[in-house]
Image (spheres, helix red, strand yellow):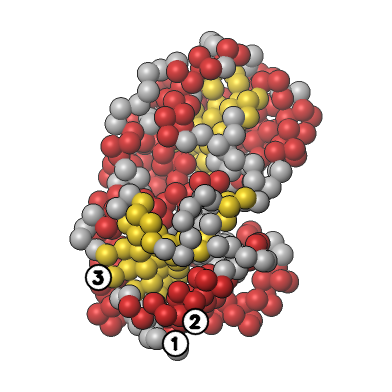
Protein backbone atom coordinates (compact mmCIF):
# COMPACT_ATOMS: atom_id res chain seq x y z
CA UNK A 1 0.00 0.00 0.00
CA UNK A 2 1.32 3.44 -0.98
CA UNK A 3 0.38 6.04 1.61
CA UNK A 4 0.94 9.79 1.41
CA UNK A 5 0.78 12.07 4.46
CA UNK A 6 0.45 15.82 3.88
CA UNK A 7 1.17 18.26 6.71
CA UNK A 8 2.21 21.91 6.89
CA UNK A 9 5.36 21.34 8.94
CA UNK A 10 7.24 18.72 10.92
CA UNK A 11 9.36 21.26 12.81
CA UNK A 12 9.54 20.35 16.53
CA UNK A 13 8.33 23.80 17.62
CA UNK A 14 4.81 22.93 16.46
CA UNK A 15 4.47 20.29 19.16
CA UNK A 16 2.47 17.08 19.06
CA UNK A 17 1.14 17.05 15.48
CA UNK A 18 4.59 17.45 13.92
CA UNK A 19 6.22 14.92 16.23
CA UNK A 20 3.44 12.39 15.89
CA UNK A 21 3.21 12.37 12.11
CA UNK A 22 6.88 11.37 11.87
CA UNK A 23 6.49 8.65 14.49
CA UNK A 24 3.24 7.39 12.99
CA UNK A 25 4.73 7.15 9.50
CA UNK A 26 7.83 5.41 10.85
CA UNK A 27 5.70 2.81 12.62
CA UNK A 28 3.41 2.25 9.63
CA UNK A 29 6.53 1.86 7.46
CA UNK A 30 7.70 -0.95 9.73
CA UNK A 31 4.62 -2.89 8.63
CA UNK A 32 5.93 -3.17 5.07
CA UNK A 33 3.93 -0.18 3.87
CA UNK A 34 5.30 2.45 1.47
CA UNK A 35 4.95 5.78 3.32
CA UNK A 36 5.79 9.29 2.11
CA UNK A 37 5.35 12.73 3.70
CA UNK A 38 4.84 16.00 1.83
CA UNK A 39 5.51 19.05 3.99
CA UNK A 40 7.10 22.52 3.92
CA UNK A 41 10.30 23.84 5.45
CA UNK A 42 8.58 26.39 7.69
CA UNK A 43 9.93 26.64 11.25
CA UNK A 44 8.28 29.62 12.88
CA UNK A 45 9.80 32.78 11.43
CA UNK A 46 12.73 30.73 10.16
CA UNK A 47 13.05 27.81 7.75
CA UNK A 48 14.35 24.31 8.39
CA UNK A 49 17.80 23.66 6.95
CA UNK A 50 16.74 20.76 4.72
CA UNK A 51 17.05 19.79 1.05
CA UNK A 52 14.07 21.08 -0.93
CA UNK A 53 11.96 19.52 -3.68
CA UNK A 54 13.61 16.12 -3.37
CA UNK A 55 12.95 13.10 -1.14
CA UNK A 56 14.97 12.86 2.06
CA UNK A 57 15.06 9.72 4.20
CA UNK A 58 14.01 10.41 7.79
CA UNK A 59 13.84 7.41 10.13
CA UNK A 60 13.26 5.09 7.17
CA UNK A 61 10.51 7.10 5.47
CA UNK A 62 10.57 9.47 2.50
CA UNK A 63 10.00 13.12 3.34
CA UNK A 64 9.64 15.82 0.69
CA UNK A 65 10.25 19.36 1.98
CA UNK A 66 8.86 22.15 -0.19
CA UNK A 67 9.73 25.85 0.24
CA UNK A 68 7.10 27.85 2.09
CA UNK A 69 6.15 31.08 0.32
CA UNK A 70 4.04 34.16 0.98
CA UNK A 71 1.66 34.15 2.75
CA UNK A 72 3.64 32.15 5.32
CA UNK A 73 0.78 31.96 7.83
CA UNK A 74 -1.24 30.05 5.25
CA UNK A 75 1.78 27.75 4.66
CA UNK A 76 1.53 28.44 0.93
CA UNK A 77 3.85 26.45 -1.35
CA UNK A 78 3.49 26.36 -5.13
CA UNK A 79 6.14 23.59 -5.45
CA UNK A 80 4.01 21.41 -3.15
CA UNK A 81 0.97 22.11 -5.34
CA UNK A 82 2.88 21.08 -8.46
CA UNK A 83 4.10 17.86 -6.86
CA UNK A 84 0.62 16.93 -5.64
CA UNK A 85 -0.87 17.65 -9.04
CA UNK A 86 1.53 15.27 -10.79
CA UNK A 87 2.03 12.60 -8.11
CA UNK A 88 -1.10 12.19 -6.00
CA UNK A 89 -2.64 9.64 -8.36
CA UNK A 90 0.33 7.34 -7.66
CA UNK A 91 -0.83 6.76 -4.08
CA UNK A 92 -3.51 4.40 -2.79
CA UNK A 93 -4.60 6.73 0.01
CA UNK A 94 -3.74 10.22 1.30
CA UNK A 95 -3.76 11.29 4.96
CA UNK A 96 -4.12 15.07 5.37
CA UNK A 97 -3.24 16.75 8.68
CA UNK A 98 -5.01 19.89 9.92
CA UNK A 99 -7.48 22.23 8.20
CA UNK A 100 -7.82 25.88 7.14
CA UNK A 101 -4.38 25.70 5.49
CA UNK A 102 -3.11 25.61 1.91
CA UNK A 103 -1.86 22.03 1.95
CA UNK A 104 -5.31 20.74 2.96
CA UNK A 105 -7.00 22.70 0.19
CA UNK A 106 -4.77 21.43 -2.61
CA UNK A 107 -4.30 17.88 -1.36
CA UNK A 108 -8.06 17.38 -0.99
CA UNK A 109 -8.69 19.00 -4.38
CA UNK A 110 -6.31 16.75 -6.28
CA UNK A 111 -7.46 13.66 -4.40
CA UNK A 112 -11.02 14.33 -5.53
CA UNK A 113 -9.89 15.14 -9.05
CA UNK A 114 -7.95 11.88 -9.44
CA UNK A 115 -10.39 9.84 -7.28
CA UNK A 116 -7.81 9.01 -4.62
CA UNK A 117 -9.45 8.41 -1.21
CA UNK A 118 -8.27 10.69 1.57
CA UNK A 119 -8.63 11.15 5.30
CA UNK A 120 -8.50 14.49 7.09
CA UNK A 121 -7.14 14.67 10.61
CA UNK A 122 -8.37 17.97 12.10
CA UNK A 123 -6.11 17.88 15.20
CA UNK A 124 -8.87 19.24 17.42
CA UNK A 125 -9.56 22.32 15.31
CA UNK A 126 -13.25 21.38 15.00
CA UNK A 127 -13.66 21.80 18.77
CA UNK A 128 -16.05 24.77 19.24
CA UNK A 129 -13.52 26.49 21.54
CA UNK A 130 -10.96 26.58 18.71
CA UNK A 131 -13.40 26.96 15.83
CA UNK A 132 -15.00 30.02 17.44
CA UNK A 133 -11.64 31.78 17.50
CA UNK A 134 -11.60 34.03 14.40
CA UNK A 135 -14.97 32.43 13.65
CA UNK A 136 -16.04 34.87 10.93
CA UNK A 137 -12.91 34.21 8.89
CA UNK A 138 -13.28 30.45 9.35
CA UNK A 139 -16.94 30.39 8.39
CA UNK A 140 -16.17 32.19 5.14
CA UNK A 141 -13.34 29.76 4.41
CA UNK A 142 -15.59 26.81 5.22
CA UNK A 143 -18.29 28.08 2.88
CA UNK A 144 -15.94 28.35 -0.08
CA UNK A 145 -13.49 25.51 0.60
CA UNK A 146 -13.27 23.56 3.83
CA UNK A 147 -16.79 22.11 4.04
CA UNK A 148 -16.26 20.52 0.64
CA UNK A 149 -12.87 19.16 1.70
CA UNK A 150 -14.35 17.63 4.86
CA UNK A 151 -17.47 16.26 3.18
CA UNK A 152 -15.40 14.79 0.36
CA UNK A 153 -13.11 12.84 2.65
CA UNK A 154 -13.35 9.06 2.92
CA UNK A 155 -13.14 9.56 6.68
CA UNK A 156 -12.32 12.15 9.32
CA UNK A 157 -9.56 10.86 11.59
CA UNK A 158 -10.32 11.64 15.22
CA UNK A 159 -7.99 10.61 18.03
CA UNK A 160 -10.69 10.29 20.71
CA UNK A 161 -14.44 9.80 20.87
CA UNK A 162 -14.75 13.16 22.61
CA UNK A 163 -13.12 14.92 19.65
CA UNK A 164 -15.63 13.33 17.26
CA UNK A 165 -18.59 14.32 19.44
CA UNK A 166 -17.39 17.93 19.61
CA UNK A 167 -17.42 18.06 15.78
CA UNK A 168 -21.00 16.75 15.45
CA UNK A 169 -22.65 20.22 15.16
CA UNK A 170 -20.89 20.69 11.80
CA UNK A 171 -22.83 17.73 10.35
CA UNK A 172 -19.89 16.56 8.25
CA UNK A 173 -21.01 13.94 5.75
CA UNK A 174 -17.78 11.95 5.96
CA UNK A 175 -17.73 9.15 8.51
CA UNK A 176 -15.50 9.35 11.57
CA UNK A 177 -12.63 6.97 12.29
CA UNK A 178 -11.26 7.00 15.84
CA UNK A 179 -7.58 6.07 15.98
CA UNK A 180 -5.64 7.38 19.01
CA UNK A 181 -2.14 8.78 19.05
CA UNK A 182 0.63 6.53 20.32
CA UNK A 183 4.13 6.45 21.74
CA UNK A 184 7.15 4.19 21.48
CA UNK A 185 7.28 2.51 24.89
CA UNK A 186 10.97 1.66 24.45
CA UNK A 187 11.82 5.38 24.68
CA UNK A 188 10.49 5.42 28.25
CA UNK A 189 11.84 2.07 29.41
CA UNK A 190 15.17 3.42 30.72
CA UNK A 191 14.68 6.90 32.14
CA UNK A 192 17.62 9.12 33.15
CA UNK A 193 18.92 8.86 36.70
CA UNK A 194 16.77 10.77 39.17
CA UNK A 195 18.16 14.24 39.87
CA UNK A 196 19.80 14.94 36.50
CA UNK A 197 17.32 17.72 35.67
CA UNK A 198 17.32 19.16 39.18
CA UNK A 199 21.13 19.33 39.13
CA UNK A 200 20.95 21.93 36.34
CA UNK A 201 18.69 24.17 38.41
CA UNK A 202 19.87 24.50 42.04
CA UNK A 203 16.67 26.31 42.99
CA UNK A 204 14.82 22.99 42.57
CA UNK A 205 16.84 21.16 45.22
CA UNK A 206 14.53 19.61 47.81
CA UNK A 207 11.42 20.96 46.06
CA UNK A 208 8.28 19.31 44.74
CA UNK A 209 8.04 19.88 40.99
CA UNK A 210 4.70 20.55 39.29
CA UNK A 211 5.31 20.04 35.57
CA UNK A 212 3.60 21.72 32.63
CA UNK A 213 5.03 20.15 29.45
CA UNK A 214 3.44 21.63 26.34
CA UNK A 215 3.42 24.65 24.07
CA UNK A 216 3.00 28.03 25.79
CA UNK A 217 -0.30 28.72 24.09
CA UNK A 218 -3.69 30.38 24.64
CA UNK A 219 -5.66 27.11 24.65
CA UNK A 220 -3.58 25.39 27.34
CA UNK A 221 -5.37 27.00 30.31
CA UNK A 222 -2.27 28.78 31.52
CA UNK A 223 -4.23 31.46 33.33
CA UNK A 224 -5.92 28.64 35.26
CA UNK A 225 -2.55 27.04 35.96
CA UNK A 226 -0.96 30.30 37.19
CA UNK A 227 -3.78 31.00 39.64
CA UNK A 228 -3.89 27.39 40.79
CA UNK A 229 -0.15 27.40 41.44
CA UNK A 230 -0.52 30.64 43.39
CA UNK A 231 -3.10 28.98 45.63
CA UNK A 232 -0.92 25.90 46.10
CA UNK A 233 2.17 27.98 46.85
CA UNK A 234 0.36 29.89 49.56
CA UNK A 235 -0.37 26.61 51.34
CA UNK A 236 2.96 24.86 50.73
CA UNK A 237 6.40 26.46 50.60
CA UNK A 238 8.12 23.43 49.06
CA UNK A 239 6.69 23.54 45.51
CA UNK A 240 8.02 24.91 42.23
CA UNK A 241 6.37 25.10 38.83
CA UNK A 242 8.34 24.05 35.75
CA UNK A 243 6.96 25.17 32.38
CA UNK A 244 8.68 23.22 29.61
CA UNK A 245 7.62 24.08 26.07
CA UNK A 246 8.16 26.43 23.15
CA UNK A 247 6.67 29.92 23.16
CA UNK A 248 5.99 30.39 19.45
CA UNK A 249 3.58 33.29 19.79
CA UNK A 250 5.04 35.35 22.64
CA UNK A 251 2.23 34.17 24.93
CA UNK A 252 4.73 33.63 27.72
CA UNK A 253 4.58 37.34 28.56
CA UNK A 254 0.96 36.94 29.67
CA UNK A 255 1.81 33.83 31.65
CA UNK A 256 4.63 35.61 33.47
CA UNK A 257 2.27 38.48 34.30
CA UNK A 258 -0.29 36.07 35.78
CA UNK A 259 2.42 34.37 37.84
CA UNK A 260 3.68 37.74 39.02
CA UNK A 261 0.16 38.73 40.09
CA UNK A 262 0.10 35.56 42.20
CA UNK A 263 3.58 36.42 43.59
CA UNK A 264 4.96 33.07 42.39
CA UNK A 265 7.03 34.08 39.37
CA UNK A 266 10.23 33.52 41.38
CA UNK A 267 9.12 29.93 41.97
CA UNK A 268 8.37 29.29 38.29
CA UNK A 269 10.95 28.03 35.81
CA UNK A 270 10.56 28.47 32.04
CA UNK A 271 12.89 26.03 30.26
CA UNK A 272 11.81 26.47 26.65
CA UNK A 273 11.32 23.39 24.49
CA UNK A 274 12.95 20.20 25.82
CA UNK A 275 13.67 17.25 23.55
CA UNK A 276 15.15 13.80 23.90
CA UNK A 277 17.11 13.16 27.07
CA UNK A 278 16.29 16.59 28.50
CA UNK A 279 12.56 15.95 28.21
CA UNK A 280 12.90 12.53 29.81
CA UNK A 281 14.96 14.00 32.65
CA UNK A 282 12.31 16.60 33.55
CA UNK A 283 9.62 13.92 33.45
CA UNK A 284 11.76 11.70 35.68
CA UNK A 285 12.39 14.42 38.26
CA UNK A 286 8.86 15.85 38.47
CA UNK A 287 6.28 14.92 41.08
CA UNK A 288 3.15 15.44 39.02
CA UNK A 289 1.99 16.66 35.62
CA UNK A 290 -0.69 19.33 35.06
CA UNK A 291 -2.51 20.30 31.85
CA UNK A 292 -5.69 22.38 32.45
CA UNK A 293 -6.39 23.02 28.75
CA UNK A 294 -9.51 24.72 27.44
CA UNK A 295 -9.24 22.48 24.37
CA UNK A 296 -7.04 19.44 23.69
CA UNK A 297 -7.96 16.92 21.01
CA UNK A 298 -5.73 14.25 22.56
CA UNK A 299 -2.84 15.43 24.72
CA UNK A 300 0.22 13.36 23.83
CA UNK A 301 2.17 15.01 26.68
CA UNK A 302 -0.33 13.44 29.09
CA UNK A 303 0.48 10.01 27.69
CA UNK A 304 4.22 10.69 27.91
CA UNK A 305 3.85 11.74 31.54
CA UNK A 306 1.88 8.59 32.36
CA UNK A 307 4.48 6.45 30.59
CA UNK A 308 7.04 7.90 33.01
CA UNK A 309 4.88 7.04 36.02
CA UNK A 310 3.69 10.55 36.83
CA UNK A 311 0.21 11.13 38.27
CA UNK A 312 -1.61 13.54 35.96
CA UNK A 313 -4.06 16.35 36.62
CA UNK A 314 -5.94 17.42 33.51
CA UNK A 315 -9.06 19.36 32.62
CA UNK A 316 -12.18 17.71 31.24
CA UNK A 317 -11.43 19.44 27.94
CA UNK A 318 -8.47 17.13 27.34
CA UNK A 319 -10.21 14.56 25.21
CA UNK A 320 -8.73 11.46 26.84
CA UNK A 321 -9.94 12.52 30.29
CA UNK A 322 -12.45 9.66 30.49
CA UNK A 323 -9.71 7.11 29.89
CA UNK A 324 -7.61 8.70 32.65
CA UNK A 325 -10.51 8.59 35.11
CA UNK A 326 -11.44 5.00 34.26
CA UNK A 327 -7.84 3.88 34.73
CA UNK A 328 -7.41 5.80 37.99
CA UNK A 329 -4.28 7.38 36.52
CA UNK A 330 -4.98 10.93 37.68
CA UNK A 331 -7.53 13.56 38.61
CA UNK A 332 -9.80 15.50 36.25
CA UNK A 333 -11.15 18.99 36.90
CA UNK A 334 -13.08 21.75 35.21
CA UNK A 335 -11.03 24.63 33.82
CA UNK A 336 -11.18 26.16 37.28
CA UNK A 337 -8.11 27.30 39.20
CA UNK A 338 -9.46 26.33 42.63
CA UNK A 339 -10.35 22.82 41.47
CA UNK A 340 -6.90 22.43 39.90
CA UNK A 341 -5.22 23.66 43.08
CA UNK A 342 -7.22 21.26 45.23
CA UNK A 343 -6.31 18.37 42.93
CA UNK A 344 -2.60 19.29 43.06
CA UNK A 345 -2.67 19.44 46.86
CA UNK A 346 -4.50 16.12 47.08
CA UNK A 347 -1.78 14.38 45.07
CA UNK A 348 1.12 16.14 46.80
CA UNK A 349 -0.29 15.36 50.24
CA UNK A 350 -0.84 11.65 49.56
CA UNK A 351 2.30 9.84 48.40
CA UNK A 352 0.63 6.37 48.20
CA UNK A 353 -2.13 7.86 46.03
CA UNK A 354 0.42 9.51 43.74
CA UNK A 355 2.40 6.28 43.41
CA UNK A 356 -0.72 4.25 42.65
CA UNK A 357 -1.83 6.73 39.99
CA UNK A 358 1.61 6.58 38.41
CA UNK A 359 1.50 2.79 38.15
CA UNK A 360 -2.03 2.84 36.77
CA UNK A 361 -0.97 5.41 34.19
CA UNK A 362 1.88 3.22 32.95
CA UNK A 363 -0.55 0.32 32.62
CA UNK A 364 -3.04 2.46 30.68
CA UNK A 365 -0.37 3.58 28.22
CA UNK A 366 0.85 0.03 27.63
CA UNK A 367 -2.69 -1.23 27.03
CA UNK A 368 -4.06 1.57 24.83
CA UNK A 369 -1.37 3.86 23.47
CA UNK A 370 1.56 1.71 22.34
CA UNK A 371 2.29 2.20 18.64
CA UNK A 372 1.81 -1.42 17.45
CA UNK A 373 -1.85 -1.42 18.52
CA UNK A 374 -2.46 2.03 17.04
CA UNK A 375 -0.82 1.16 13.73
CA UNK A 376 -2.80 -2.08 13.35
CA UNK A 377 -6.03 -0.13 13.72
CA UNK A 378 -4.94 2.59 11.30
CA UNK A 379 -3.87 0.12 8.61
CA UNK A 380 -7.22 -1.67 8.94
CA UNK A 381 -8.91 1.72 8.46
CA UNK A 382 -6.84 2.38 5.34
CA UNK A 383 -7.69 -1.06 3.91
CA UNK A 384 -11.40 -0.61 4.61
CA UNK A 385 -11.38 2.70 2.76
CA UNK A 386 -9.38 1.41 -0.20
CA UNK A 387 -11.57 -1.68 -0.52
CA UNK A 388 -14.55 0.56 -1.11
CA UNK A 389 -16.28 1.10 2.23
CA UNK A 390 -15.36 4.78 2.29
CA UNK A 391 -14.38 6.26 -1.08
CA UNK A 392 -13.92 10.01 -1.32
CA UNK A 393 -16.89 11.91 -2.69
CA UNK A 394 -16.59 14.27 -5.60
**Above or below, 260 relative to 371:** above
- Residue 144 position, x and y percent, is 63, 83
Q: Mark 2 points at which residue?
A: 109
In the image, which disc is placed on residue 336? none
Q: In which quarter of the image is the C terminus?
A: bottom left
Foreground of the two, 90 or 285: 90
**Above or below, 38 relative to 370:** below
- Number of residues whose C-alpha sits closer than 10 Å to that of mark 2, classed few (under 14), some (14–19) or many (20 or more): some
- CA gap between label 3 and label 1 equals 20 Å
Q: Mark 3 points at which residue?
A: 1
What residue is shown at x 42% (from left), y 29% (from top)?
Answer: 277
Q: Do the residues labelled 2 and 3 touch (CB within 8 Å)?
A: no
- CA gap between label 2 and label 3 equals 21 Å
Foreground of the two, 289 or 351: 289
Q: For numbered disc 3, what is the local secondary structure?
A: loop
- Number of residues whose C-alpha sits closer than 10 Å to that of mark 3, classed few (under 14), some (14–19) or many (20 or more): some
Q: Mark 1 points at which residue?
A: 113
- Residue 154 position, x and y percent, is 39, 78
Is there any visible trace of residue 369 in the rendered image? Answer: no
Q: Which sits earlier in the primary sequence, circle 3 or circle 1?
A: 3
Is 359 on the left or on the right of 108, as rendered?
left
Is there any visible trace of residue 251 in the rendered image? Answer: yes
Q: For numbered disc 1, what is the local secondary structure?
A: helix
Q: Do the residues labelled 2 and 1 touch (CB within 8 Å)?
A: yes
- Residue 221 position, x and y percent, is 64, 43
Q: Which sits earlier in the primary sequence, circle 2 or circle 3?
A: 3
Is 136 on the left or on the right of 94, as rendered?
right
- CA gap between label 2 and label 1 equals 6 Å
What residue is shown at x 64% (from left), y 36% (from top)?
Answer: 225
Q: For numbered disc 2, what is the local secondary structure?
A: helix
Amino acid sequence: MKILHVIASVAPRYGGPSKLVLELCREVGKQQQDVTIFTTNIDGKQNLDVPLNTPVEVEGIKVWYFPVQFPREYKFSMPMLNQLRTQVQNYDIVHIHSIYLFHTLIAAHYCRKFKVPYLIRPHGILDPFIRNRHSCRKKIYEFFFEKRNLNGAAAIHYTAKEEMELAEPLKIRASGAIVPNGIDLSEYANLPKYGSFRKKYPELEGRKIILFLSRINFKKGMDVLARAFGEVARKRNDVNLVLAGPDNEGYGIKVRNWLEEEIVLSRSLFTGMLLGEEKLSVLRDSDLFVLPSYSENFGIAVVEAMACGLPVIISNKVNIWREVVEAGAGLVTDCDSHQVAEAILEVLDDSPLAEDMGERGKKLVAEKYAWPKIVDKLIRTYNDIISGSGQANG
